[in-house]
Image (cartoon, coloured by chain):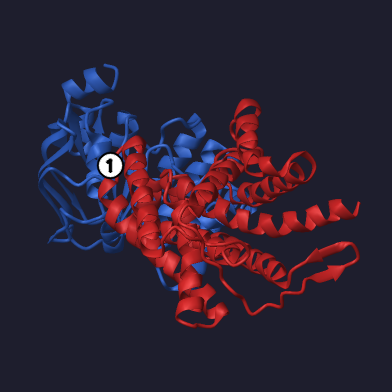
Amino acid sequence: MGTGRVAFITMLELHNLVCRYGKIAAVKGISLAVKRGQLVALIGANGAGKTTTLKSISGLLPPAEGQILFEGRDVTRGTARDMLSLGIAHAPEGRRVFPQMTVEENLEMGAYLRRDGRAIAQDMERVFEQFPRLAERRAQVAGTLSGGEQQMLAIGRALMSRPKLLLFDEPSLGLAPNIVERTFAIIQEIRTSGTTILMVEQNAYAALEMCDYAYLLESGSLALEGSGQQLLSNPHVRTAYLGG
Amino acid sequence: MGQFLQHLVNTLILGGTYALLGIGLTLIFGIMRVVNFTHGELYAFGAYAVFALSMLLGANFFLALVLALLGGMALGALIEIVLLRPMRGADIDTTMLVMIGAWIIMQNLEMLTWGGVAKAVVTPFPEVPLVIGSVSVSYLRVFVLVMALVLIAATYFLINRTKLGKAMRATFQDADTAALMGVSINRIYTATFAIGSGLAAAAGALLGPVFLAFPTMGDLAALKSFAIVILGGLGSITGATIGGFILAFVEELGAGYVSSGYRDAMGFVIIILVLMFRPTGLFARAERIG
């Protein structure tokens, strides 16, 4: 865990959030909190409402009911653009790099709302230092990168907005085991460097091992919450999500 | 040989404006997934705008061209905001019906405003054609080609070298993710429709003085635009550019060596052949824009 950090204060709060696709409620009134500097995990089975929750936080899917507070402000009706300019970046499921744009252009898109050209260039160099593979491929279109490289690009792109809160949706999905390990290591580095993280992850064991706090979603509602260790030792979590 | 050269020159001149029409339509379809039936009416708008400004109001011809382009963009933005924005999320058929309605209304407004008699635009270019060897071409037509090439180059620059263009390409590739990057999808859609409409209006403003302006002139232009877009592959600007020149070439040769009565049928022959043998278009690698 981090070095001498100031006392945690709440960065993000959801109050009785309800999200609907047409008439079907995918999220049925959940409340959760993410404190500054924390890595919070949201775990649960497929279709539990994890991705939907992230989409409503990042403004892609306006919630039907409930409230979203970011740094104490009500941002429930914010658009994706509003949320990003407040400091919430979202690395979506499946990486979603722009396949016909170069690595550099993808990173520039991450900094789309920023106007500080020189600092953007510096941040891009920092991403390239962190991910030398991307530096080698900076003029290559992203669609030709391997899955692991695309993941690094998606993370780098999310960092380019200099977020306060980073939402990760299934960062390990579809990646080779050694890349999964690397991805989780990078996410922990990002947290250590001071960015708060809310992560949705199907790999419950890995997520609970690395998080400060976790919420378990089951069919759109919160079933459990607690520290990673608490959930790891919970009998229900063990049988249902950790294979006994 | 001389006749063939003449056809080639005519191909270039017609092809430039066809390319403008095709690029405009393919941008709109590629980024917005809207089948834009008003495209031909924007073309007619461009021709009538030049006629009204230069013949009725006495404005300078070149100024009239610029204003026609800008007016086309403004009209396109208006159509997008008033008709398409409320339809966001509706399926493609519904949007198509609305656009067909807009097309009919616009054409009838032109009829009401200008009457059925075709209007001619007099330009400052000399009547005597430029003759080089066996090829003769009017100065106006050379000007039309140059302007079309300038606008094509400007569009390429906009899409590939500007921040707006980058956001347009990102939206084309993945609108949700572009929104996550902070791109305002609504603004991109309005800009796209405005640019596509402006290109159609520019094509009309350039060709109106070459031919004549009449209320149904947009119909054929729209159909040809669709032929060009199908030929080039949906969403491909390069495809639309080359497609525009190919259609012009086929029309010229068809009119010259088969029968001039079949000139406008050539577009449909192309649509049928492409859809039969290469339905993704001649130049579509994968779906892309740029």
Q: Is residue B163 visible?
A: no
Classify residue B55 as left or right of residue B244: left
| Callout 1 amino acid | Cys
Q: Please, is residue A81 above or below residue B230 in the view?
A: below
Dot 1: element: loop
Classify residue B260 as left or right of residue A211: right
Q: Quadrant of residue B121?
A: bottom right
Chain A colour?
blue
Q: Which residue is mark 1?
A: A211
Q: Please, is residue B257 above or below residue A68 in the view?
A: above
Q: Quadrant of residue B153?
A: bottom right
Residue drawn at point x = 28 percent, y = 46 percent: B87
Looking at the picture, tell me which residue is in the foreground, B22 or B209: B209
Classify residue B211 as left or right of residue A192: right
Q: Chain of mark 1?
A: A
Chain B colour?
red
Name the spot of residue A211 as percent of width and height, x first.
28, 42
Classify residue B253 as left or right of residue B26: right
Name the spot of residue A139 as percent of width and height, x first.
63, 54
Structural crowding at the residue carrying mark 1, measured as other residues with C-alpha within 10 Å and reported as few (<14), some (14–19) or many (≥20): many
Residue drawn at point x = 36 percent, y = 46 percent: B99
The total of numbered circles placed on residues is 1
Residue drawn at point x = 35 percent, y = 52 percent: B179
Q: Is residue A37 visible?
A: yes
Name the spot of residue B221 as percent of width and height, x first.
54, 50
Name the spot of residue A230 as percent of width and height, x first.
18, 33
Looking at the picture, tell me which residue is in the foreground, B48 or A199: B48
